Image (tube, helix red, strand yellow):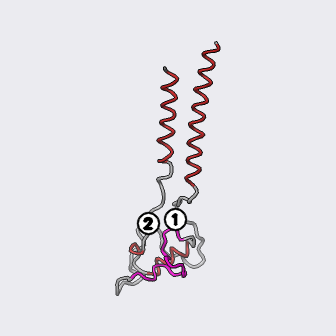
Amino acid sequence: MRPRSTAAVVVLCAGLSVPLAGTAGAADLDCEDFATQAQAQAVLVADPDDPNRLDADDDGRACDDHVYGVGISATTSPSPTTGQVATRPVGAVAAGDGSTAPDEGSVLSYVLGGLAFAGAGAAAVAARRSSRTSA
């Protein structure tokens, strides 16, 4: 009975860890998160893959259909809600914002890892069981 309960715990832990593996993604930014179009454009230029979908019509301009408040200057407006610098100084190097956005295909690696973990646990239980019966 003990090997079965051990196998059940291993499979249960592997099954619970797979869905929770990729939950620490970056915060999604919307056009409302920026005080000016220039700030949104700077985020789009920093990451042309546009994971935040700021350039909905793929014309190269971020948030061009969003209406921003009148009278807000770019120098006094707050940066986006991520707490990062919205525009790079001239000559700066794009270093990223410290977050990692999950790829579309990254779920497969978590599923395969979970299956490999569960398979390894099952193989260990089977090996232990066969060693007890042969001895």
Examine the rendered structure and indicate whether residue 114 appears above or below residue 50.
above
The residue closer to the viewer here, 15 or 91, is 15
| Quarter holding residue 32 | bottom left
Amino acid type, mark 1: Asp
Which residues, given as a range, are shown in magenta?
50-66
Q: Is residue 56 magenta?
A: yes
Q: What kind of element bears circle 1?
A: loop
Marks 2/1 in contact by CB < 8 Å: the verdict is yes
The residue closer to the viewer here, 45 or 1, is 1
As measured in the structure, the alpha-carbon distance from the residue carrying label 2 to the one carrying label 1 is 9 Å
Q: Residue at x 50, y 27 (%)?
A: 6
Residue annotated with mark 1: 97
* Relative side of 112 to 37, left or right: right
Examine the rendered structure and indicate whether residue 41 appears above or below residue 81.
below
| Quarter holding residue 73 | bottom left
Amino acid type, mark 2: Thr
Q: Residue at x 40, y 81 (%)?
A: 66
Q: Residue at x 58, y 44 (%)?
A: 113
Examine the rendered structure and indicate whether residue 115 appears above or below residue 9.
below
Examine the rendered structure and indicate whether residue 85 appears above or below residue 123.
below
Q: What kind of element bears circle 2?
A: loop
Tell me which secondary structure the magenta stretch mostly adopts: loop
Count of numbered circles in the view? 2
Q: Position of residue 96 (x, y in %)?
A: 55, 66
Q: Residue at x 58, y 38 (%)?
A: 117
Residue annotated with mark 2: 82
